[in-house]
Image (cartoon, rainbow, N blue to C red):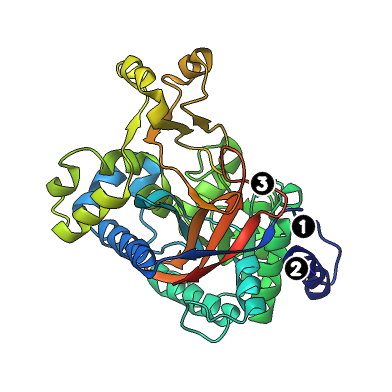
Amino acid sequence: MKLQQQFEQHAQQSLGESVRIPENLISDEVVQIENSDYQIMLRTIEAFEKLRANKTYISFVEKSHPISEFDPKNYAIMMSYDFHVNKDGVKLIEINTNAAFSHVVDWLYQIKNIPTLYEKENFVEQLKKDIFQELQFFGNKPSIQNIGILDDEPKKQAAYFDFLFFKKAFQKLGWETFIGDPRDFQFDGKALTFDGQPVDFVYNRCCDFLFEDPKNSHLKEAYLKKASLFSPNPHEYNLLANKQRLIDITVPGFLESIKLEPKFIDCFNQVIPKTIELNESNSKVIWNSKKQYFFKPKNLFGSKAVYRGSSISHKKFNSLIDQNFLAQEFVAPGIHDEFKFDLRIYTYRNNPYFIVSRLYKGQVTNLRTPDGGLGFVSIL
């Protein structure tokens, strides 16, 4: 039986209800990578943690957006770093502070009977440890009674079953858990609530990363008043996952100006592809070398509105100018048999949970390729 079918059975049995699982979520393929490449990925994560702790860098980012001036002091549970690994080496593609499907990858490790990367004996215990660590950093709530899992129209999301796995895990730890849309949460100026119940901890999967949508103004206010712990939060997103940061980091001399240690500068120079903002002043030069680039919106996610330079039309290209797009040096994905793949490492701060491959065909990573999806990684 294929792993996809096994997981579908596991989900129905574990959750006790019928849930929709994406058809091409899990692959039977095993991607092999060299340990030397894996070590580069771990050094990259370490380098970003050092960057994230750099006071000059923090001050620079906090000036970039009004909400970033507020630092709640906590971080982001279940974030990820995405890489391409090919014959030319390792390149970072992007960082996500609210990465999906971690429970799927945990199951994949269990079914393969492979040791995970985290410290505790099981995923739920490690999750508990990291949430308590978040509480200590946040410093405003001594304990948790209720948790809210937040996303836009969660029941319509492909990851809804993932939310149900988190709900089950949180309830196992003794926390009442609610899954809801922003409209399901209320803020009275003092307490964030869900159906009248106080929400102490928000596992934030909402992709309004900076709470800019007017419908989320109550969440923004609750966040700024530390009425509830949001993990991840706008401050952490802006420090690490905002694609503007890749533009900033690759500006010549920027890392030296903030006095980042040379070994971490060398790491960034090695793994971060050239990334520049697309605008009127540079559009002609970029168009003439368009085959060298991918074009991505700064503020969208999940491969939405991403264009390969070699196939983009002049009309479409012109429509992107001054529309908050970036041009990122094209980095070929890895190849496994007939599949392309990238690699994702789930982390909490500098501590990895798992590494997983995402196998696909076509232009960008997706969950639409038969026999593609999330796959196990063997480190040689």
Amino acid tagged 3: Asp
Q: How far apart are marks 3 and 1 (CA)?
A: 18 Å
Q: Name the residue under label 1.
A: 21
Instruction: Give the number of the mark in front: 3 or 1.
Output: 1
Q: Which SS class for mark 1?
A: loop
What residue is pinned by disc 3? 152
Amino acid type shown at disc 2? Phe
Q: Which residue is drawn at 18% across and 43% down?
A: 254
Of 133 and 140, nearer the camera is 133
Label 2 near label 1: C-beta < 8 Å? yes
**Residue 230 on image: x %, y %:** 51, 59
The residue located at (47%, 44%) in the rendering is 210
Amino acid type, label 1:
Ile
Q: Earlier in the sequence, mark 2 or mark 3?
A: 2
Residue 319, image x, y percentages: 50, 16
Quadrant where the C terminus sits is bottom left
- In this rendering, is residue 265 above or below 246? below
Residue 131 pos. (x, y %): 50, 73
Q: Badge 2 is on which residue? A: 7
